[in-house]
Image (spheres, rainbow, N blue to C red):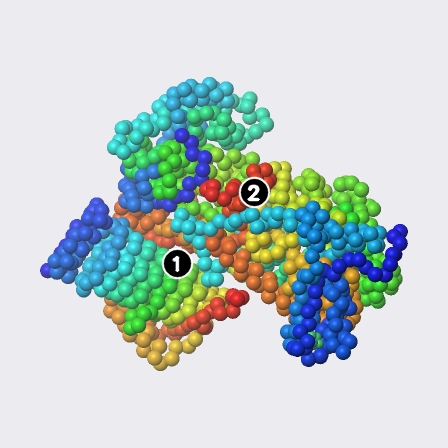
Amino acid sequence: MATELSPVSQIPPEFHVKVDHDQCRKCKRCVLNCSFGCMQFKDKVTPDHSKCVACHRCTTFCPENAISITDHPMVYKENANWTERIRQNTLKQAETGGILLTGMGNPKPYPILWDHLLIDACQVTNPSIDPLREPMELRTFLGSKPDKLEFERDEHNNVRLKTQLAPHIQLDIPVIFAAMSYGAVSHNVHKSLAIAANKMGTLMNTGEGGLHEDLYPYSGRIMVQVASGRFGVHSDYLKAGAAVEIKIGQGAKPGIGGHLPGEKVGLEISKTRMIPVGTDALSPAPHHDIYSIEDLSQLIFAIKEATDYMKPVSVKIAAVHNVAAIASGIVRAGADIVTIDGFRGGTGATPAIIRDNVGIPIELALAAVDQRLRDEGIRNQASLVCAGSIREAADVAKAIALGADACVIGTAALIALGCRVCQKCYTGNCAWGIATQRPELTRRLDPDVGSQRLCNLLTAWKHELQEVLGSLGVNSIESLRGSRERLRGIGLDKETLEILGVKPAGVGM
Amino acid sequence: MRCNTRIPSGCAISGMMCESGDRVDGSAIIKSIALMHDRSNGLGGGFAAYGIYPRRADQYAFHMMFDDFAAKENFDEYVKDHFIVERDEVIPTSPFGNITSPPVLWRYFLNVDEKKLEFVEDREYVVNKVMEINSNVPGAFVSSSGKNMGAFKGVGYPEDIGHFYKLEEYKGYIWTSHGRFPTNTPGWWGGAHPFGLLDWSIVHNGEISSYGINKRYLEMFGYKLELRTDTEVVAYLFDLLVRRQNLPMELAVKALSAPFWDNIDRMEPHTKELMTAIRMVYGGALLNGPYSIILGHSRGMMGLNDRIKLRPMTCGRKDDMLYMASEESAIREIEPDLDTVWSPKAGEAVVGTLNGEVE
Amino acid sequence: MVMTIDAKGMYYRELNKMIRTAIEEGETEFVLDNINGQRYIGDAIKAKAKITIHGTPGNDMAVFMNGPTIEVFANGQDGIANTMNSGEIIIHGMVGDVIGYGMRGGKLMIKGDVGYRVGIHMKEYKTQVPVIVAGGCAGDFYGEYMAGGVMILLGLGAGEDKPIAGDYLGTGMHGGVIFLRGKVEEYQLGAEVAVMELDEKDLKLVTTYVTEWCEHFGHDVDEIMSRPFIKLKAVSSRPYGNLYAY
Ligand code: SF4
Ligand code: SF4
């Protein structure tokens, strides 16, 4: 255990908050809004720079535009090896003896392969299609598909479907909301996501913290998760969901469990998670009924049995080095959907060492998995959903072209709700009422407004995806899905291109 | 020289069929495709003809192209090991104007030894061998491999190719043809259309924008796409859906040229279920982008265009003759006095079916 | 003088050159026999002239045409009246796809059915108002992007299996007006159009053109006018105002 040292921290502040006192009219809104205790009032607004997290809450609500936040002017002696981050972290650990905890996704400047992929367009030899005036279909079905259909004739000699299809979820846009648990995020976030998913014909995902009773009316558009802590998992919960997801791992923390501190477990969370108020909610690192692939199969079928084979079962894993083989095993174990979460994916709380150094990028994982499943002839058996920092519609288009059936957005959805990616989710002080359970903060997010913002975001992406399809000269998303021929790589080495299955830019068909 | 890059091309197509099984010679189809001369650019033309080998109707007729005689010798060794060669002969040609440097053109009439069919049915065996030859026997290319049919194709304007192969001297109950407008010069005869596999033949106008995923979809079922042409993709898709998976033709067509979801949503429940399942399961087979195709097979001919009709197709009937072509004038050229003439709707197949015995 | 040309087996360049040269020399009337598939007849001709065609003319007939009258006693193919500026075309048959693309003026009278994307991006300019009247039914995307002009579809021969027009009717329409003699389902309409009733002025306009159409093809005006028309107009001249974020 670490021993606390002197109360005076040696760690220099990260940000500098400047209040223009000529403009300030002392309304104290900034003080009221600041949930990190940075803005204080002593005759005038007096910021404690060391507490600022750059969440923008004060600047957004200051009626006089009197506040500006900059990097703290303090400079460290320049050193490319001993970076500011490393020195700061070293000081923190020297003062606390703790694992560095953080929130949101990996901020390190690893190559983002989405930004090294370019999309094709039609010129002359085949026409582009006008997405605004001609049909442009994004409808997507998640679930297991047979390799072939069989038909029979009825008494009137009409052709009828003989094959019984496995259960599917119909999506109107191939973008679904990420698993974020009630606990990690507020009830109002869950409600915003549920309403938006319902309106837009997509899915939200409960995460591992159960489903609050208020949200059961939306459950036709909710994927319910079963994680190692089994919080709030009961038969009604499984039956309520549109699909059930077994969470094995998460991109931001592969191989790591979860920990919702007891302070956050109030009455509502306690009811939803089915644990006593104030107890820590600990998710073990593995499922203790899954120590091997055949155990996964056993759990998949336990869930299918529980839901009368009416719901597709998804298995979510983090993108790790051997992801292709693991995904193949998951498909063979009976999963209908495989969700792969890349190493830039977000989280409410994780050790920085894991978030920043473990796993592989989703682009490579996705490409490797899709190809592997095709090589093995089992690609139809499961839908492939990719997650882990899908930032914009262009990422979605590229992911689909690499082979994804649908994409997951977590951070992007939270940003739409107000999040400023300050990475302080684990503190429970989120000023935007997102990653917090403090009632005075959660109140800040109105689910009607929040859901509308999410709908707007998805609507905008939908149009953008349609623009891309149109310029590619196809009018249905399945003609882009897996069509790596329509992507080119730029600034990528040969091996990476090979794994992605794309040619370098400049090479024709 | 074989071309390993994919070449987009525009085109003209024309097809005719006598549904009662009567056979006509190849001069009409040459005339029809010649009228659309300006839709091609002299870099590829070809024909498929059905009913041309009535005396060897039970044998697989392999139309072969060889880079040179050495390649042929090589192939002769190969073919003896895998087939019973009933007869082989040069494909007759007459030197014709603009046709230069043809490959060695030879045809083989083949049977498969029963012993080889212990674990695989004979058409599957032939498909596997065709793919093996095209990828592994150097300098040899199978241009068609069906029974009582053949493909005649090459680099040149289609009418010149037709005369070069002396198609006036063959009689068939189905004729399809193609004039090509590729965007560069492959100079390789095998790359011309039609594409043939077993008794499937495809001629095709337009470019398939979904090629990338169609190819990967087929590869999953073991097809090797050697030519990198859209036509090859279409032929393999029919082979997969109709021959291997037994889809009725009318449903296979719905997989390739799928109705829109909006329309499906308005269908009566059974049809809706059927179409939804087809789109869910065969998404990788959806042909997207502008095309019109004419598919030939031993029992009929089918015309199909894309789901928003970006490529033209006109059809006509006169007695028991069915015609389809990129332009109405190409039909009128050989049958001015049609009983009916119409343009099929987007994604709606026009089907000609053999209802008599082949003459 | 009437210049008669037997176009049997004639290549389009030769044919069109003959016509152009004769026009330059003051010829004003042409009869083309045995036409089959020759493209570009009337291409960019700027003159008063009458061209009568027997046989099926090829694609892009009357492309960029500016003045002449063409009458075809057969079916037409694709791309008729492409970017046409003025003149008149009468077709005693049906026509193919993409008819009147970007047509800016002139008149197109068609006896029978029309194919896909007819009247696509037809537009008005100053006093020029293009008109397409067709007696039969239309394929999908009728009036796509329509920005101006008048299209009238009489729907003769429409029935259970053959709706008067296909889907995506008037999709992207932001100007001009469409009159249909018959009803369409709500789902057939593009998002940008609304169905309206004809007012007196509309009725007068339709009657004028229908009368003209009947004169060409020998139908009874009253009988055609006895069935109600509907009118389609763009809801807004800027249908995509809310689509973009700045
Ligand atoms: S919100 Fe702005 S105006 Fe109000 S007290 Fe703070 S700095 Fe001053
Ligand atoms: S959710 Fe809140 S605490 Fe977390 S990064 Fe976003 S703004 Fe910061």
The part of the image, by quadrant, that contains residue B40 is top left
Q: Quadrant of the C terminus of chain B?
A: top left
Q: Percent position (x, y) of residue C16?
A: 20, 52
- Quadrant field for ligand 1: bottom right
Image-based side of B236 in relation to A41, left or right = left
Q: Which residue is mark 1?
A: C116
The part of the image, by quadrant, that contains residue A292 is top right
Q: Percent position (x, y) of residue A102?
A: 75, 55
The residue lying at 23 percent from left, 57 percent from top is C42
The residue lying at 37 percent from left, 63 percent from top is C121
- Bin the neighbour count of mark 1 within 10 Å (Cα to Cα): few under 14, some 14-19, many 20 and up: many
The part of the image, by quadrant, that contains residue B184 is top left
Q: Is mark 2 within 8 Å of ligand 2?
A: no
Image-based side of A312 in relation to B181, left or right = right
- Residue kind at label 2, given as amino acid type: Leu
- Please tell me whether residue A90 is drawn above or below residue A272 in the rendered image: above
Q: Percent position (x, y) of residue B136?
A: 50, 26
- Residue kind at label 1, given as amino acid type: Tyr
